[in-house]
Every structure is written in C-alpha cells, then in structure tokens.
Amino acid sequence: MLRLVAGLAALATLSACASPYVSTPYDRGPANIQSIAIMDDSLPDNVAMYQSASVGSNFGLIGALADGVAQAGREGRLKTILDKQSFDSETVFEQALATSLGAQNYTTSSAGQARKNRAFVEKYPAGADGKGAYLDVAVINYGYLAAGFGTPYRPAVTANVRLMSADNKMLMDNRIEYNPLMAQQGVIALTPNPEYSFMNIDEMEKAPPGKVTEGLKEALTVVADTIANLLK
Amino acid sequence: MALPGPPALQVSGANCGDTASLATPISLTPEKPAKSHIVSAKADSVTPCLREDGVPARKYVVFALPDSYETKLITAGARPEIGRIFAPDVSILDADGKVTRTFAWQDFLLRGDIFSVQFKPRKEERYLLVRSEPKMVGQSFDRIEIGVTTTSTYAAGTSITWNTGHDAAVKRTFSHEGEVVVWVQDPAVK
C-alpha cells in the first residue's frame, strides 16, 4: 500500500514535468482491421481511493505512512460498497468496450490471460488473421481521486491502450486519463461528470444505493467509448 | 500579458473571401529539427474570414505542413483561454488546396491543454486549414479541473514546502476567436 501511495504521488509530481507523450494515431483505411480481440485482465484487482495533496503528504515519511493506513482503510470500505452492489469493474469495462467497438463495425472477441503487472502484454496469442488485431488496454489505476484535503473525490481512470496487428505491428498507441490530476501534454484528458462527487468515504457509504458504482461505471464507459472512437 | 477577449459569437461577414487563401501560410517547419515544436496563432478581429456557400462567416488560419512529413505527428486545434476557446474545424489540403481529410467534431479531444485532432501527414498533403466551426460557437466547454499547488516558504532557517489540492468547475464558451495551436512532434529526433 505504501508503494502504491508513493507510486501515485511520484506519478502526479512527475507528470507535470515529464517529456510530452507521443501517441500513435490509428489510420483505419490502410490498416483494414475488421475484427478485434480484446486482451483480458484490463483492470487492476483493487479499486483505488486516493487523495493526492493530503495533509500527511506534507510530513515526509511519517505522513506518508499515516496516509497509507488511511488510504487502505478507505479502499477497504469502497470495496465493500462495490461488493454490496455486485459491481464487477472488469466486466463492466470490457463489455462497454465490446459494445462501443461494435458500434464502429468491428467484430470482437476476448483473448489472453492474467497479467503480471499493469504493463502491456508481452506476447500476443496466435490466431488473429490479417484482418484481425489485438486491443490491449492496461488500466494503471481506477477508482476515486481527490486533488487534496477538502476537495471532493471524483471517479478517475488512467489507461494505456494499444492496437497490435496479427504480425505484431503497432497500429495505435494512446494514453487516456479520466479526471486527470495533471494531464501530461499529449495525453487524452477526459473531464469527470460533476454529478458523481463525494467529500469522503462516509458520504459514499450514506449515498443512495448504486450512486458510487454509477460514477465508476460512467468513467469506465466513457474511457471505453473514447478508445473505440480512436479506432473509428 | 493581455487577457483574452470575450467569446466572439459572430463574424460580420464583411470583407470575407469565399475560399481560404494559401498565399501566406504559417510554417510548421522549425528552424532546426526538433522533437517538439508548437506554433500558435491568434484568431482575432483582424484574422481573415471565410464566407462559403450555406455556412455562416467564420475565421480561418492556414498552416504549411512541415517540409519532411514522414516521422511527424501533428496535433491541431485550440488552447482554452479564460472564458472562451476557439471552436476548431480542421481540414488537410493538398498542394492545389483540395481537401484530402476532414475530422468530425467527435474526433476532437483535449490532449494535455490542446483541444485537438491528431494525425500523421501523408505524402500528398501540404496545408492545414483551421476554421472556426459555427455550429459549435456559443456552446459550452465546461470542465472540472483539478491539480496540486505547491507553495514554499522560508522560516526560522528552514525551507517549508506545502502541497494543497484544488478542484474547480471551469466554464468556457466556444468562440470564433481565440488561440489556434498546432503541435508538431518528431520522435525521430533525439
């Protein structure tokens, strides 16, 4: 958990001064892809509930440790909320992706196996013919994010996505952030729906049933729609 | 630094041409090879305008695509300003001014701080025409913008840094005037 806190804090700090991101836009005409296999295990196992500029973040290691404990507590309670709604984030996302790609006239299937980390797949399965490709979406984190103490938690998703041809050529590569903390130049920045905001986990627990999961579902669906639109 | 004006919701139509002039395009070729090269142009009251059949008068800016196109990635559109954002409509033209590609409004996304479309130029393409989109002028471009502010103070011989989060609903209106931006990336340059 401390690694996650430190990792996300480092990401937020570095993204503002990192080199601009270079994407690879998709050119549908020459590529002529008609079927897409969606690689499995898009989402991390655990939902996040992260406060970036927390009070603890200003007090070095001791503050970071306290933050880690607080974050773990919040995330456990958020997971309970999702479990009560039987909310399966992975299924919601991959179904949204298949639906959106279908609307762009692609036939879709799923492929692959569990990833070891949130990186792109190292070796794509055989089977796609010349008109098929693999859509690899590696969601780095998803959940609820607050900029700092006293600001609301809003749904957030960070995803890397690429489309690989059957002969291992990269056809498209992009990064998408829903509710970005500091959008890096070149990264697609999607604004969150203001309807879904909560000041803390207590407010989430008291919210009408389904409200918290609706916010997550909308975020995941908007990211899926954006990916499909990039492959138009 | 002068503040931007209010959103321009109409173009008068006086002295507008019926085709975009390609005579003096803004060059997108940097003085020397560069990994990243951003060119911006203000669309304002003196920017040329177009009056095409069936389309309300609108502003336009023409850019000349980079001399060597093979490795370039172009991000073209508009940068949000206080209260407004230019409503971009991007077309790519060949050497004769004929349109080779256009983009739907749904193709525009905010990439970093540029509301844009993205493409790799093709061999036959020479110009980038960015016009204001009358159908979107006057519509809202509302966003929730979050971030972290770091402040540093020095007291009693100690430097103290404090991070605070900020979260704001920011409203802007699409406009015929504003900042048009084209970002040229060349990953082949080390």
Image: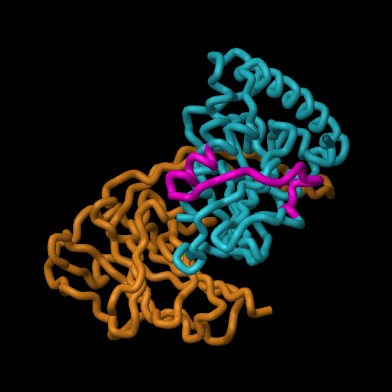
Q: Position of residue A66 (x, y in %)?
A: 83, 30
**Observer able to see residue B144:** no
Left/right of residue B39 with respect to residue A19 in the rendered view: left
Q: Quadrant of the C terminus of chain B?
A: bottom right
Please name the residue shown 33% across and 76% down the image: B93
The chain that appears orange in the image is B
Residue A162 versus residue B102 in the image, above or below: above
The stretch in magenta equals A96-121
Left/right of residue B30 with respect to residue A204 in the rendered view: left
Please name the residue shown 53% across and 71% down the image: B73
Q: Nearer the viewer, residue A80 or A61?
A: A80
In which quarter of the view is residue B43 placed? bottom left
**Observer able to see residue A49:** yes
Residue B11 versus residue B36 in the image, above or below: above
Please name the residue shown 49% across and 63% down the image: A32
Please name the residue shown 82% across and 28% down the image: A69
The chain that appears cyan in the image is A
Residue A182 versus residue B31 in the image, above or below: above
Q: Position of residue A109 (x, y in %)?
A: 59, 44
Q: Quadrant of the N terminus of chain B?
A: bottom left
Q: Position of residue B179 (x, y in %)?
A: 39, 63
